[in-house]
Amino acid sequence: MQHFINVVLPIPLEKLFTYRISQAEAEWLTPGIRVTVPFGKSKIYTALVYEIHTTPPEVYEAKEIHEILDQRPIVNPIQLQHWKWIAAYYMCTLGEVFRTALPSAFLLESETLVLKNQDVEVNENDLRDDEFLVFEALQHQSSLKANEVAAIIDRKRVLPILNRLLKKNVILLKEEVYQQYRPKLVRYVRLGNEHLSEEKLEGLLASLTRAPKQSQVVLALFQLQATQKAPIKVTDLEKASNSSKAVIKALVEKGVLEEYFIRTDRVVYEGNDGNSEIKSLNPIQKSALDDILQSFEEQKVSLLQGVTSSGKTEVYIKLIEQSILSGKQALYLLPEIALTTQLIARLRDYFGEKVSVYHSKYSLNERVEVWNNVLSMEAKAQIIIGARSALFLPYTNLGLIIVDEEHESSFKQFDPAPRYHARDAAIVLGNLHGANVLLGSATPSIESFYNVQTHKYGYASINRRFGNVLMPDIELTDLKEQTRKRKMKGHFSERLLEEITETLDAHEQIIIFQNRRGYAPIVECTTCGHSPQCPNCDVSLTYHQYRKQLRCHYCGYHMALQETCQACGSPTLDTKGFGTEQIQEELQELFPNAKTARMDLDTTRGKHGYEKIITAFEQQEIDILVGTQMLTKGLDFRNVNLVGIMNADSLLNFPDYRAHERAFQLMTQVAGRAGRTKKRGKVIIQSYNPYHQILKQVSTNDYIGMYSEQIYERQLYKYPPVNRIIKITFKHKNFNILNEATEWFAKSLRNVFGESVLGPEYPPVARIRNQYLKNVLIKINRDWAISRTKDSIKKIERSFNAISQYRGVRVIYNVDHI
Ligand code: ADP
Ligand code: ZN
Ligand code: ZN
């Protein structure tokens, strides 16, 4: 009997692929083990065993697997089930989920190695100069990697030269797979066995009289071994004996000292010991906790709506405590950006070692370590706090999932597939584990609140700040009137300036919110009206004064700012609109004695960029912090008493059915950064349209008012949560082909779904990176069978792909697009 496995490959293939294995391998392998397999002409991929069987594939000859990578499964059956749901629901392939789910260090791909062709006598005169360099390098080295070849010839593209060398029979190519994860080994030392007794040590020291440095090391080590139970690191010994690596090395070579290695995790927390008492809840928090437990009893997802600074986190902590007491794992999901040391430190105060963190700024190796700790149910991975990717860790025993800031749109992955919503995928995961799921927010998404209204979710609320701190006082200022009365200084109204002055005088801190980075979004010539555009995208270039550059925020294209207009040559360039850079500049002029800083994408690059600014602000090294929506996420600053929102209108005027919901959430969250301690905070919102309904609702903290109005519109226009939507984006570099193709697709969709199909339409930026874009939107009635609907769409796509002139058009599904 022949044996086969079906595997998941990390590529967008609809089907699983079958490989042949031996009888022995069939007995050994189980689903969830990784193997490397050949695929295509020469590639080797890491694949995941999905099932083991004895049926040969019908349409191709199964190849043999290359290698088995794991001793035991690194992915469990619940995960596979979860991935299957994600692939089906979000209309992507299992391979795409696999690729996103695993830390990339687990997904080895082969690399091309260049080897010398031993069988051929090479005439060096036949070689061009660059070819000779490679040939020569191969005389000294058995193989070269592509990047090494590139370094040798000092050029990025190596394929042409490799092809030439292949033709001349000088080289051979081979595919090789490398293990990317390297365990971190810490070096320790101890005294060699034969010196362990005191007499022997004396003898040893006597023999070292001529080497005083060495005997100093031996004495220091002896002392360390006597006083500390833990193994002794080489670096500790260096310090204790005040000597160098070389001296220690010499002793190791003599056999006096023994070196050994212990594998450790890269991220090790020190300091927070987990001994802090968990705070007891106040009566409002307690009653919220009871409501939550009640809905868990009924096996419902629960939504906790608590105003900013009401102590939601303390409620989460209680639930986590209960969950781990029952021996289960707990997952605490947050938007990437809210994952600050503030929160991590807070959890570690209570739970110490049991907390692990997982998110995208972690390195390859760090992620593998967390994965392995969760897999082997190590005590240190009992509580995972992470961004959306933490959903994919190999939990075996989840008891609780918390999705904090559940309204955040960054929970939805935009690109690449799977375009999943982490909150919704978390609810499904919770179901698979029989775990309790709690969503938390001060400003719940319309979806989640709708699910409460329709009794799908349970509900709990805390409508007071902890310690009875008052909600901030929110004041609207009319920019139209201020401009008319000539009261504006730069982009600041009189009221905002007054408040800034007062706050600075009181030595309190200020947050200024402007949702655009850079200096100005548009540079315009006042003579001819020309404004510089990105050559690759249909969008104006944003002016960044700091670097004197014009930059595209879609593709990263940038150029130096020209002195004169590129169209007419006049030196009459002016800017329109404003971003965080300009606001910071104005503040520096208006308040020269205040320390200002900026927090946006430009200032927070790098692993700790964000952290540094937050810490500096926390330690009050900064008076005024100007920032984009990064500022809104769950930060708890003690000394902020004023928040200014520069321009509410830019938030309200988005052409999107969610714009108003988002504006409400964003402004309420930013406002929530003010006055979190005793004193009541102040918020000033500047707007040309201060009578806008949403602004009123923000200023009176009227969530229900906002919800009722928005849900009415969603019902009227059949938008989520009343209906589901699938957005299909089409991409192609040729404008005409794209238009034709999308017309064809939309028409076919209309044949099935009729009026529920909207578009095709151009998005606001209709060309990005030289690709034209067009969208079609399908509104899907909640009563329709969603899988049948998706099958119909996929069927249309298959016919579409069969039309040769449309073949290059990319079709991208975004289910529950937000
Ligand atoms: P939220 O998560 O709702 O924004 P937090 O949990 O950050 O609110 O609470 C705000 C502040 O109040 C924090 O400093 C927190 O430690 C404190 N706090 C909340 N609840 C309690 C409690 N029951 N006992 C003591 N301090 C509390
Ligand atoms: Zn001009
Ligand atoms: Zn661009």
Image (cartoon, grey):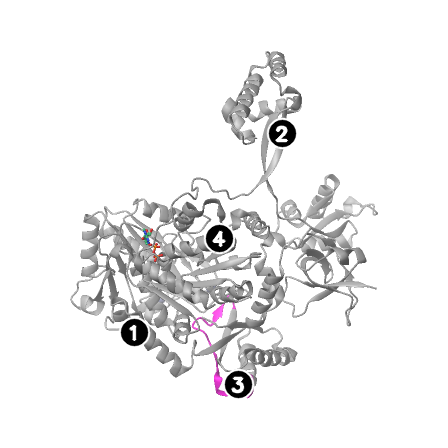
Quarter of the image that includes the N terminus: bottom right
Give the residues in magenta. Answer: 749-770
Q: Residues within 10 Å of mark 2 (few under 14, many from 20)?
A: some
How far across and how far down the image is residue 268, in percent? 50, 42
Q: Residue at left 52%, top 50%?
A: 381
The residue where tag 2 is placed is: 259
Q: Sequence-wise, which precedes: disc 2 or disc 3? A: 2
Tell me, yes or no, if residue 406 can be seen here. Answer: no
Q: CA distance from mark 2 to mark 3?
A: 71 Å
Instruction: Indicate which quadrant contains ligand 2.
Output: bottom left
Q: Amino acid at mark 2?
A: Glu
Distance from the alpha carbon under mark 4 to that under mark 3: 48 Å
Task: Kindly report which numbered mark, 2 or 4, lies closer to the viewer in this rendering.
Answer: 4
* Element at label 1: helix
**C-alpha span from label 2 to label 4:** 39 Å
In the rendered view, tell whether residue 755 sits above or below residue 268. below
Mark 4 lies on residue? 324
Q: Amino acid at mark 4?
A: Ile
Residue position for label 3: 753
Q: How far across and how far down the image is residue 668, in percent?
A: 31, 64
Q: Is residue 327 above or below residue 535?
A: above
